[in-house]
Image (tube, helix red, strand yellow):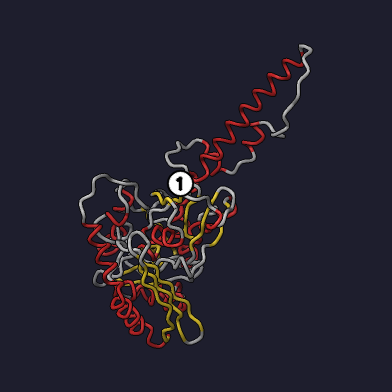
Amino acid sequence: MSKHGTEIRLATRGSDLALRQAAEVKAALEDRRLAVELVEVETTGDEIQDELIHRLGKTGAFVRSLDEKVLDGELDGAIHSMKDMPTDNPENLVVAGIPERASANDVLVTPDGKELDELPEGATVGTSSLRRKAQLLNYRDDLNVEPLRGNVDTRAEKLLAPALQQEHEARTEAEKEKQSNKAREQKGHTVDYDAEFDRTVEEWFNDLAEIERRALEREVETDYDAIVLAQAGLERSGLAHHLEYVELPSSEFVPAPGQGALAVTALDGELAGDINTVLDHPRTRVETTVERTILAELGGGCVAPIGVHGLIQGESVHVDVQVFSQDGQEVIEASRDVPVENHVSAAKEVAADLAEKGAADLIEAAKADTDEPREAKREGETSEE
C-alpha cells in the first residue's frame, strides 16, 4: 500500500485537538484493516508564538511543515483542519480524503451561557480570527474584541479564570470568617452565620472539572466576557459539556471556508486512491470545494475577513459569502444556489460577481494593512478551529 508496506505513517500536529482529530482518521482507516502510525510534527505556526496568523507572512503556517514531510517521502500523508489549508497545493500533492464534516458553526462561550445580545455594553470578546472580529464588530460595534491565542483548552481556561478565581477567593474568605466565628462562639459570643456557601473550599474544588482547576492556576491577563470558538473544535476536544455556549447565527456569522472539516493529503497515486475510497464523504467534498474555490478566486487567503459556507440542498449547493473590511463596518455579501453538477465553475462565477461588487477592494485593503510595518507584536491564533 505504501513504501512502508501495509502501514501508513501520517503527520499530525501535536496539540490535543489535532491528536483527537488524527485519532478519528486513524480509526476510520484501521476499520478497513490498514495499520496507521501517527507522527507528531511541529509546524511554523506552532513555533512562532507571538504573531497573529495573518502576520505570519503566508498562508498555511500550520500546514506546510506537515506536507513537506509527505513531499520529501518521509511520511505517507498528513492530517489537517481544512480551514487552515492554503487553496494552492504543491505539485503531486492531493487532498486524498475528506471525512464527513462536523458542525461548521461558530459558538459564543461565556461563563454563564449569555447570548451575544445579552453581553454588557463594551464587553470584551476574545478571538484572534480576523473574520470573527469583523463579524462581531459588524453585529455590535460597541464590543471590545481582544486577541486570544492558544489551543481550545487554553482559550477556555482564559475565559473561566477570572470568575473562578474570584469565587475561590470569596469562598476562602467566607471559610476563614466561619472558623473565626466558631472560635468566638466557643468563647460565649453570639454569632450570626452567613450561609452564602454550603460547601467547604475543598468540597467545592473537588467538584470542579479538570479545565476549571487549571483555570484557577492561570495568570489573568485579560478579563474576557466571552470568547468565540468553532463548535467542531469544542466538541472534538471533549469540552462541550464543561462549558456554557450558544451557537452564533450563521446568517450573520458565516463560517470560514472548510471549517469543521478534516482533510488528508498524500502524493497522487495508489495510496491517495485507497485513502479516498475509505475516508471520502462526497457531500462534504462538494460543499468544501465550493467554499475553497470561492476563497481561491477572491484571493483572500487568511489576511482578509472572509466567510464562505456551502450546504447541499437537492441538486444545488446553497452558498453564503461575506467579505468584510478589517473593522467590520463594510461588508459585501451574497447568498446563491450553485448546481452540484458544475459546482466549481459556478463557484468561480459567484466569486467574480462578489469581486466586481467591491469584495476585491476590501481584500486589497486587508492585504495592504497586513504589509504595513507593525509597532508591536500581538498574541496570535493557533489553528484550533
Would you say 315 lies left or right of 11 here? Answer: right
All told, the count of numbered labels is: 1
Residue 229 in the image, given as x and y percentages of width and height: 47, 56
Q: Residue at x 39, y 68 (%)?
A: 307
Give the labeled residue for mark 1.
Answer: 154
Residue 251 in the image, given as x and y percentages of width and height: 48, 70
Looking at the image, residue 94 lies above or below residue 315: above
Would you say 89 lies left or right of 135 here? Answer: left
Instruction: Name which quarter of the figure residue 354 lies in.
Output: bottom left
Would you say 113 lies left or right of 290 here? Answer: right
Q: Nearer the viewer, residue 176 or 375?
A: 375
Q: Secondary structure at mark 1?
A: helix
Looking at the image, residue 3 lies above or below residue 312: above
Q: Residue at x 47, y 46 (%)?
A: 224
Q: Quadrant of the C terminus?
A: bottom left
Q: Quadrant of the N terminus?
A: bottom left
Q: Nearer the viewer, residue 113 or 30?
A: 113
Q: Is residue 274 visible?
A: no
Q: Residue at x 46, y 58 (%)?
A: 140
Residue 184 in the image, given as x and y percentages of width and height: 73, 15
Which kind of residue does numbered mark 1 sit on? Thr
Looking at the image, residue 78 lies above or below residue 292: above
Instruction: Name which quarter of the figure residue 22 lies in.
Output: bottom left
Looking at the image, residue 385 lies above or below residue 278: above
Q: Is residue 365 visible?
A: yes
Sort mark 1 into few (<14), some (14-19) or many (20+) by Cα contacts within 10 Å: some
Residue 73 in the image, given as x and y percentages of width and height: 27, 63
